[in-house]
Image (spheres, grey):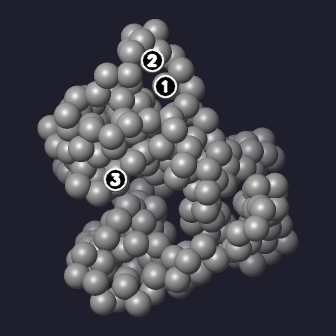
Amino acid sequence: MKKYKNIFFSVFLSLAFSYIVYFGFTSGYSKYVFSRESFSNQYDHGIYKYRILSKQLLLKTDDVLQNYFPDDKAADRILVLDKTGTDRFYYSYYLLNTFFLVVFSIVLALLFESDRILIINKNEKVLLLFILVILIAVTQYVIVPYDVASYFFHLFIIWIFFIGFERFPKLTVACTCVLIILSTLNRESSALTVTFLAIILLLRNGFNKKSIGTAVLFFISFFATYIWLRFHFEKSESLFIESNRIKENITAYPNLMGILFWLFSFYLSMSLAVAKENKYIIILYHLISLPYIAACFFSGILFEIRLYIPLFLSSVLQSKLDT
């Protein structure tokens, strides 16, 4: 029981900070997405329309809440963000993201208890749980339905792979492929999960037929889903490139602060490394993830520091891997 006390700590920490962020502060960033109509106006277009899993989960949550919020009243703080916004839709964001933050924190605590995989002492476990849960809660000044869910899928897939691959390789690979598909239906950053798994496979087992074949299966699970989403929902918009924001990302002050966050987070993960080999793995992971990084600079908004969180989560785990 003592071994899993950090699970209870992480659950209550997630509940506390999610409530603090959603009801102690009003976002100065996310606007015009707090009613079904305004939500559809934004999320049925551009890159957002491909993230179908989290969109449907949010709308289903709103449907359930209609029993408790039968009218469309909205507090002043909601109307500031969206004149058509409602308390019910805001609560839908809060409940959905709080749920995924809780299950994320549980999986993170379970990963930290995997002594055969990670080299991490009990004080580091508590500190990293505290830092990562609070950091994710804070990044929700950009209120979206899919980010926290994507962090959960990212860690859950890694955890399933770690605990099952040696004992039940075929079943674990099958489950991992299914989860990668679900994660891709939620957000295309699932590519970073595939990258993480491929690196672990190839470093542990070498460039043999089994490890390469398994990595290819993971890649196909992601890429086939990604391509299907693009062609299924594509109309007249660009198939792969949404916009070009690279100039504003390297000149605008808010985005420069985002770049600083990337650099400080990378430095922190390197500082946590238990050996030189772990630093090499982190660097390798970032190099292989350059397409994602380039996409963030080209079509993302770097002030949204949430974009680096999947890389940071992976780097923290890689810093503690028992090489």
Q: Is residue 60 above or below residue 93?
A: above
Q: Which residue lies at the image location 61% right of the left edge and 57% below the top edge? A: 45
In the picture, the disc for residue 30 is 3
Asked whether disc 1 touches disc 2, contact meaning CB atoms under 8 Å apart, the reply is yes
Q: Secondary structure at mark 2?
A: helix
Amino acid beneath label 1: Asp
Q: Is residue 65 above or below residue 145?
A: above
Q: Which residue lies at the image location 33% right of the left edge and 40% below the top edge? A: 83
User: Is residue 263 at all visible to an observer of this figure?
Assistant: no
Q: Secondary structure at mark 3?
A: loop
Q: Which residue lies at the image location 66% right of the left edge and 68% below the top edge? A: 198
Which residue bears the numbered disc 1?
A: 62
Q: Earlier in the sequence, mark 1 or mark 3?
A: 3
Q: CA distance from mark 1 to mark 2?
A: 5 Å
Q: Position of residue 106 (x, y in %)?
A: 40, 36
Q: Secondary structure at mark 1?
A: helix
In the picture, the disc for residue 176 is none
Q: Earlier in the sequence, mark 3 or mark 2?
A: 3
Q: Which residue lies at the image location 28% right of the left edge and 52% below the top edge? A: 141
Q: Is residue 204 above or below residue 248?
A: above
Amino acid beneath label 3: Ser
Q: Position of residue 153 (x, y in %)?
A: 55, 46
Amino acid beneath label 2: Leu
In the picture, the disc for residue 65 is 2
